[in-house]
Image: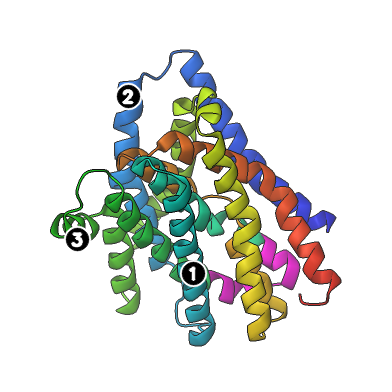
Amino acid sequence: MLANFMIAINAVVPLFLLILLGMAARNLHLLTDTELNHVNKAIFTVMFPLMMFYNVYSSDLSSSFEASYIGFGVAMTLLVYFLGLAVALLVEKDNRSRGALIQGIYRGNAVLLGLPIMINLMGEEARGLTAVMVAVIVPCYNVLAVITLELFRGGKPDIKDILKRIVTNPLIIGAVLGILVNAMGIRLPSLIEEPLSDISSAATVVALLVMGASFHVSSVRTNLRDLIIGVCGKLLFSPAIVTAVGYLVGYRGMHLALLLIISGAPCAVSGYTMAQQMDSNSELAAACLIFTSLFSCVTICGWIFLFRQIGAI
């Protein structure tokens, strides 16, 4: 249990250091609001799409592919998404906040915590299945996020315009190109792969710095109700629902553990950037990311302890 707690701590602490560096840069007047908007746009239109492409392109989608289990993971993602949608529609009247709240409830940072915790829990044999699940779930997260944020931009929805924005969304394009290149077995030369890998690694770092510089502590008080709902929904209700259904279906061991880690991970870093670029409540998105990352160390370890006590994982 202590080892899992330390893995969660080691995964989360660097996030906070980068966020604090961003806050310091703002307080030292090293970055202006105009510069932050330009960098955020570059992250959204260039860095994250390349990261999506590289993550899918570099995954071995053929090995460890269990169609029924992966399908179940996608179905659970959709279940949590629609429950989050229902909650947001009931408790929040502002469309901009609705989109950010929904995204905060269903969309997790599976890439950061998923693989290291699963390997620690289940050994190296968990690497393949985890990588495939992440490679499938993350594009689903992005498609749902684009649809949600487009629907809740405000004003009267225009279906044609929404579909056009979805098809032309940079993250969707990056994921689709990655799937196509991967499926066709095309291998890029190292002089292209290496820069893609570097950009993929840097995207999250830059996004966290910008988020820290853009974050205002006063926004916590302004969005307190939605923040509490988002944090509880992401770290408590989402894993409770997904693992309960998984347990009843019959999943145990590595398969149940992966459902737990995927559903109980803190909010995705890219959620803030998308919210900021797509006219959603980016302050709520940033607060959800910060506080779910903070509390996930405790909740993930608590969930692992519970399921190990009953012999399920």
Q: Earlier in the sequence, mark 1 or mark 2?
A: 2
Task: Tell me the residue that label 1 is attached to.
Answer: 79
Task: Tell me the residue that label 3 is attached to.
Answer: 163
Amino acid on which the number 3 mark rests in the picture: Leu
Of residues 1 and 232, the one nearer the viewer is: 232
Alpha-carbon neighbours of circle 2 within 10 Å: few (<14), some, or many (≥20)?
few
| Between marks 3 and 2 in the image, the one whose residue lies nearer the viewer | 3
Q: Give the range drawn in magenta.
A: 117-131
Say which residue appears at 28% left-offset and 66% top-offset: 177
The CA distance from mark 1 to mark 3 is: 22 Å
Residue 88 in view of the camera: yes
Where residue 65 appears, x then y in whole percent? 50, 83
Q: Which of marks 3 and 2 is nearer the N terminus?
A: 2
Q: Examine the rendered structure and indicate whether residue 42 appears above or below residue 75.
A: above
Q: Which mark is residue 35?
A: 2
Say which residue appears at 29% left-offset and 67% top-offset: 176
